[in-house]
């Protein structure tokens, strides 16, 4: 999908959890690449495997998890690294911005100490210099009165400020890759927009690749270069953001887009996706979306579709994508398909 060697490459990547009820296949044969400086959004319903995919990349899975395939950062397989080596990569070459900044920060430590410690551990910077760089980064992420705020504890900051602190911490070592897991969920709409603008500016300034994990397609329109849609532990569609919004190829993507409130249509036009996500211990035969898909045919119920290129720059896991084969471009959906 990109030119040159990717910064991050997941190939036939799997994550399974052993439970008393059976094995949960949380991520199933996933292939994904992220180029240097690129912003890729990973979207899908809760339970689709978005967060677990990157928890595995960072070595943050529960003890009952097993991984397979490869997850390479700059050609080095993260899954085969010793914990000590992975510790050096985390924070220095890649960093995570978690969903809830209050739980990501130590409530008993001042902001200054938490930020400076990152540089002291990963770069061996002396305390005074580390604190000066921490203050400089707080200013870069737009925290007002940074000299005062850096002396405070996390509970003394607003939710938006705490999220900016977590972003500053992620950026301090100038990582090549940042993964932001639902970074705006707990914030009001105005602060959400500010955080997304901040990500856009900072990735441009630092040349950092960004993976944005979200359940909401609406937040990625103005920030992502490319979108990967996940369902039941697999990528079911991947395309440039403009192409995806203009015409989704996969019925699940179209259903996901119809479930988003939009300013240009009535609230009543929002359609929740019918049915429930599949049981990942006992997934359905064929396409995992077929029990919820209004266009499913017998082949969909018998055979699982591969993630394949359906037009230049777009992959979809669907036997009957909304594609005009004659033109070779995304075309009109079937007549009964609601337009998005």
Image (spheres, grey):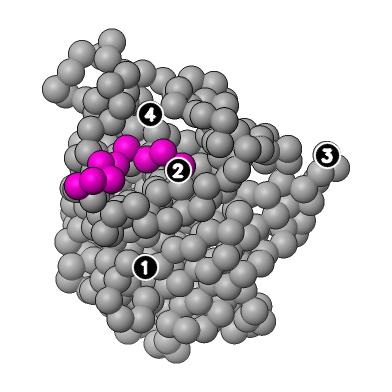
- The quadrant in which residue 284 appears is top right
> Magenta span has 254?
no
Q: Which residue is mark 4?
A: 255
Range covered by the magenta-colored residues: 318-327
Whether pointer 3 and pointer 4 mark residues with C-beta atoms closer than 8 Å, the reply is no
Label 1: how many Cα within 10 Å (few below 14, some 14–19, many 20+): many
- Mark toward the start of the polypeptide (1 vs 3): 3
Q: Which residue is mark 3?
A: 21
Q: Calculate the distance from the C-alpha at mark 3 to the C-alpha at mark 4.
A: 31 Å
Checking the image for residue 34, the label placed there is 1
User: Looking at this rendering, what residue extends furthest in the right direction?
Assistant: 20
Label 3: how many Cα within 10 Å (few below 14, some 14–19, many 20+): few
Which element type, helix, strand or loop, lies under badge 1?
strand
Label 2: how many Cα within 10 Å (few below 14, some 14–19, many 20+): many
Q: Calculate the distance from the C-alpha at mark 2 to the C-alpha at mark 1.
A: 23 Å
- Mark toward the start of the polypeptide (3 vs 4): 3
Q: Is residue 76 left or right of residue 24?
A: left
Q: Which residue is mark 2?
A: 318
- Mark toward the start of the polypeptide (2 vs 3): 3
* Nearer the observer, 249 or 200: 249
Can you give x and y, in whole percent of width and height, for residue 164 in the image?
30, 55
Which element type, helix, strand or loop, lies under badge 3?
loop
Can you give x and y, in whole percent of width and height, for residue 78 in the image?
57, 76
Which element type, helix, strand or loop, lies under badge 4?
helix
């Amino acid at each position: 999908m990109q030119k040159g060697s990717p910064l991050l490459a997941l190939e036939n990547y799997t994550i399974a959890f052993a439970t008393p009820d059976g094995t949960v296949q949380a991520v199933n044969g996933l292939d994904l690449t992220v180029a240097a400086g690129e912003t890729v959004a990973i979207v899908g319903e809760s339970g689709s495997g978005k967060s677990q995919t990157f928890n595995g990349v960072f070595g943050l899975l529960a003890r009952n998890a097993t991984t397979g395939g490869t997850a390479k950062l700059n050609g080095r397989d993260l899954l085969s690294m010793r914990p000590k080596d992975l510790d050096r990569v985390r924070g220095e070459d890649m960093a995570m911005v978690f969903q809830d900044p209050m739980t990501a920060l130590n409530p008993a430590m001042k902001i200054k100490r938490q930020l400076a410690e990152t540089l002291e551990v990963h770069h061996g910077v002396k305390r005074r210099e580390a604190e000066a760089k921490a203050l400089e980064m707080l200013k870069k992420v737009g925290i007002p009165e940074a000299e005062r705020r850096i002396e405070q504890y996390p509970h003394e900051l607003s939710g938006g400020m705490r999220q900016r602190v977590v972003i500053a911490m992620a950026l301090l070592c100038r990582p090549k890759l940042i993964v932001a897991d639902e970074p705006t969920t707990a914030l009001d709409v105005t602060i959400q927009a500010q955080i997304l603008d901040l990500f856009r500016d900072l990735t441009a300034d630092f040349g950092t690749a960004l993976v944005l994990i979200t359940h909401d397609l609406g937040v990625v329109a103005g920030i992502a270069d490319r979108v990967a849609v996940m369902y039941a532990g697999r990528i079911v569609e991947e395309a440039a953001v403009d192409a995806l919004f203009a015409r989704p190829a996969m019925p699940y993507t179209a259903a996901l887009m119809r479930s988003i409130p939009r300013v240009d249509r009535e609230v009543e036009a929002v359609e929740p996706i019918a049915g429930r996500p599949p049981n990942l211990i006992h997934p359905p035969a064929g396409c995992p979306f077929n029990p919820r898909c209004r266009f499913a045919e017998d082949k969909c119920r018998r055979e699982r579709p591969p993630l394949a290129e359906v037009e230049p720059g777009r992959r979809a896991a669907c036997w009957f994508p909304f594609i005009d084969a004659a033109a070779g471009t995304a075309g009109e959906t079937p007549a009964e398909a609601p337009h998005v």
